[in-house]
Image (cartoon, rainbow, N blue to C red):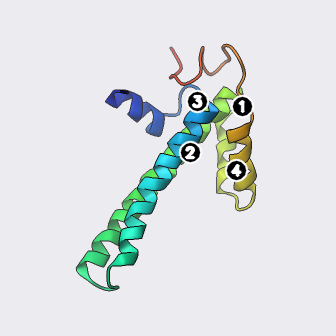
Amino acid sequence: MPDRSDLIWLFFRISGRLSRAAYFLGGLLVAIIQAFPLYRFTLVPEGTTESNMWSFIFFIAFIASLWSNVALAVKRLHDLDKPGVAALVLFVPVVSIVAFLVLCLFPGQPGPNRYGKRTNSPAEP
């Protein structure tokens, strides 16, 4: 079981490298966390206190998920030995779908690279 610092690194830090599987599964978890409050929002009558609460929770989850998606993509790009700034293409409609597929399908660089000695770990100082 990963400890808390591993999860903080995975979803909120941009140093290090990330494998295809970890990128996909991390992104899936972020999507589920984002979808749950949206689902709950659709089940309650519009304009109620409960509706307002679920929309606020969705807003918070959406903001947190934006950063998490960027952090995951930056580490995945690092595994491909590419600069993390390229993660900005995830915000371009249509191009983001192609970028996501590339990040999920292309294998990372074997062995150490300038972003870390190994995959699925933070960069060592």
Q: CA distance from mark 4 to mark 3?
A: 18 Å
First of labels 3, 1 by sequence position: 3
Q: Position of residue 50 (x, y in %)?
A: 26, 76
- Total labels: the figure holds 4
What amino acid does circle 3 point to? Leu
Secondary structure under the numbered disc 4 in the rendered image: helix
Which residue is labeled 4 in the image?
A: 89
Secondary structure under the numbered disc 1 in the rendered image: loop
Q: Is residue 40 left or right of residue 9?
A: left
Name the mark nearer the viewer: 4 or 3.
3
Q: Position of residue 89 (x, y in %)?
A: 70, 50
Q: CA distance from mark 1 to mark 2?
A: 14 Å
Which residue is labeled 1 in the image?
A: 82
* 49, above or below 85, in the image: below
**The image quarter in which residue 108 lies:** top right
Mark identifier at residue 18: 3
Q: Residues within 10 Å of mark 2 (few under 14, many from 20)?
A: many
